[in-house]
Every structure is written in C-alpha cells, then in structure tokens.
Amino acid sequence: MPEDHFHQTHPEIIKRLKRAEGHMRSIVEMIESGRECVDIAQQLHAVEKAIAQAKKTLIQDHLDTCLEQAVGTLPRERRRSIDEFKEITKYL
C-alpha cells in the first residue's frame, strides 16, 4: 500500500470489510439453503452497518488527515469553517 495513502484507520477498515465479506458469503449460502427471510434480513442489516461504518471511518480519517494537510495552518477565524465542515460530516 503506498505510504502517502495509508492512514492509521486503514487496518481497522480492512478488518471490518473482510468481516462483511465473510458475512456476505454466508448470506448467499443462507439464501441458497432456504433459510428464513428474517434471518437473512438480519444478516444483511449487519453487513450494511459494517460497510457504512467502514465508509464513515474512511471519510472522517480522510478529512482529519488529508484535508488538514491540504489546508495547512490557518488563522482561527478562517479555521472555523473547516472545523464546522468536519463536524457536520459526522452526520452523513
């Protein structure tokens, strides 16, 4: 992995996505074996949540790292809009 695109959270994100990948395989097996729809839906929900959390972590890490590097040091009054932007993205 190129060093300039590696962040501290990447191992956590990779772990989460690999776990979701395993769940997806088991969901396919559940469907193929005729498991109850409620059980399948529950597992799909868990995969959705895992992927959404991975995405959120990736975006927040990007903002905290890459945006900070791009913006650099700013006076306090100009910094406020960047901080507000970072804060509001937590609700995506």
Image (spheres, grey):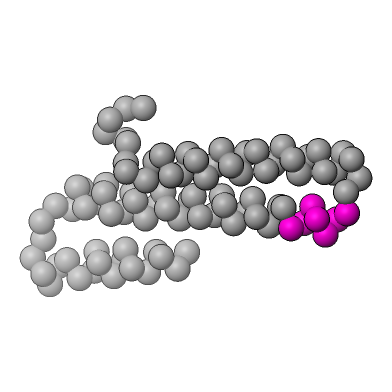
User: Residue 83: x, y in percent?
Assistant: 25, 67
Residue at 31% in and 63% down = 86
Q: Which residue is at 49% across, 40% downward?
A: 15
Judged from this view, the residue extending furthest toward the right is: 34
Q: Against 29, is 48 above or below?
A: below
- Residue 64: x and y in percent read 28, 54
Membership of 77 in magenta stretch: no
Q: Main SS type for the magenta part?
A: helix
Q: Is residue 15 above or below residue 71?
A: above
- Percent x, y for residue 24? 69, 41
Image point (65%, 38%), residue name: 22
Q: Is residue 14 left or right of residue 2?
A: right
Viewed as shown, does residue 40 lie left or right of 53?
A: right
Residue extending farthest top: 1
Specify the quadrant that holds the N terminus.
Answer: top left
x and y, in percent, of residue 27 in the image: 76, 44
- Count of number-bearing discs: 0
Using the image as rendered, state which of residue 87 and residue 46 is in the foreground.
46
Point 85% across, 55% down: residue: 37
On the image, which quarter does residue 73 sit in? bottom left
Hey, which quadrant is residue 88 in on the image?
bottom left
Specify the segment rendered in magenta: 36-42
Residue 41 drawn in magenta: yes
